[in-house]
Amino acid sequence: MDNTTDVTEIMLSALSKDPHVQIMFFVLFLAIYMLTLLGNTIIIVVIKVDPHLSTPMYFFLCNLSFTDIFYSTAIVPKMLANFLKQESISLQGCLAQMYFILLSAGAEIFILSAMAYDRYAAICDPLHYTNTMSKKICIHLTTGAWLMGILYASVNTVLALHLHFCGSNEIGHFSCELPPLLKLSCSDTFLNDVALLSSAVIIGFGSFIPILVSYICIVSAILKIQTTEGRHKAFSTCSSHLIVVGLLYVTALVQYMKPSSVSSTTVDQLLAIQYSILTPMLNPIIYSLKSREVKASLTRMAGKIQILPKNVHIPKLCI
């Protein structure tokens, strides 16, 4: 392709060029996507229908599950279609996908921050918990998380709209993430790089610092509890959140702090699979396994579901 040719279509890189391996990947990621949709939908439905889960913690968990569905859907369907038949995506479609990836990622980490603050209020200031985490405040925190995601996505997408793309049209990634997309541009991307780094640092630290401060206070409060049972009970209320935060931030740290000598397309794609595809699937599993309230609610719902009423008589078939 001539280097002066304008790029209007983007080819997403497949995880493998082998057709048999691609079919295997299609089945694998289809199963992961279906589990993601099923698990997070179950969490949302259970929280909505069970009055026992009408608490701020589960309000945030419901929003986290919705964000995980949104995040996964922005990436996986196009990825699955690419396994069956590698087709290009329009430049506008690629930028749209990039926008929704940034939006959902930004919203998710601030929802995790709100969940950390909720645990801080519950453990460190239980007497004022009802006022501290009122319904109005919970809605404001969730709205703020989505607004931060919109701001993060909009700043980087608007700047990307002014870039000129020419030459190669294959992005070294299975989705339209911004860093590999910038490598295709013929324009000067200095402003985009500065904006991406600055916004990522602001978003990253702006969400991580509240989590860190909250858990420093939580750990301090737990250590002051006299009984082992009391400490275990207090810690168990935030263990699920800690695991989810760990999965997300450890992967992000490895992604951005790893030496350039170990940086490669394969490593970057594996890390991206972890935080953008596997984590949305694992979140509902982690909360279901670690939360007694969710398990109890699922048990109650399962007990109420009957395929057929007991008094229905099924006639025998005459052959």
Image (tube, rainbow, N blue to C red):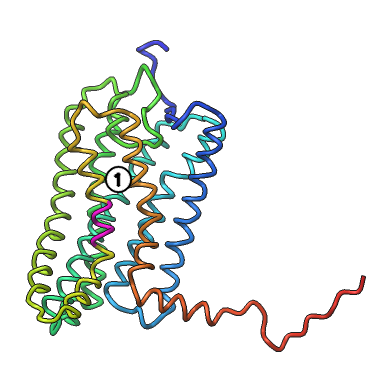
Q: Position of residue 305 (x, y in %)?
A: 57, 79
Q: Quadrant of residue 138?
A: bottom left
**Residue kind at label 1, given as amino acid type:** Leu
Is 163 rendered above or below residue 234?
Answer: above
Q: Residue at x 22, y 41 (%)?
A: 254
Q: Which residue is mark 1?
A: 102
Looking at the image, the residue that sits furthest to the right is: 319
> Residue 244 in magenta?
yes
Is 270 rendered above or below residue 72?
Answer: above
Instruction: Give the residues in magenta.
Output: 242-247
Q: Position of residue 128 (x, y in %)?
A: 13, 82
Tell whether 9 sits left or right of 160. right
Q: Residues within 10 Å of mark 1 (few under 14, many from 20)?
A: many
Instruction: Out of 131 and 155, give the one closest to the viewer.
Output: 131
> Residue 243 in magenta?
yes
Question: What is the secondary structure assignment of the residue under circle 1?
Answer: helix
Instruction: Out of 319 and 38, give the one closest to the viewer.
Output: 319
Tell whether 134 sits left or right of 69. left
Looking at the image, the residue that sits furthest to the top is: 2
Instruction: Out of 262 and 46, give the one closest to the viewer.
Output: 262
Q: Residue at x 14, y 40 (%)?
A: 198
| Majority secondary structure of magenta residues | helix
Looking at the image, the residue that sits furthest to the front is: 228
Position of the C terminus, as image quadrant, is: bottom right
Q: Position of residue 47 (x, y in %)?
A: 39, 74
Q: Position of residue 50 (x, y in %)?
A: 41, 80
What is the tally of numbered marks visible in this picture?
A: 1
Is 52 rendered above or below residue 256?
Answer: below
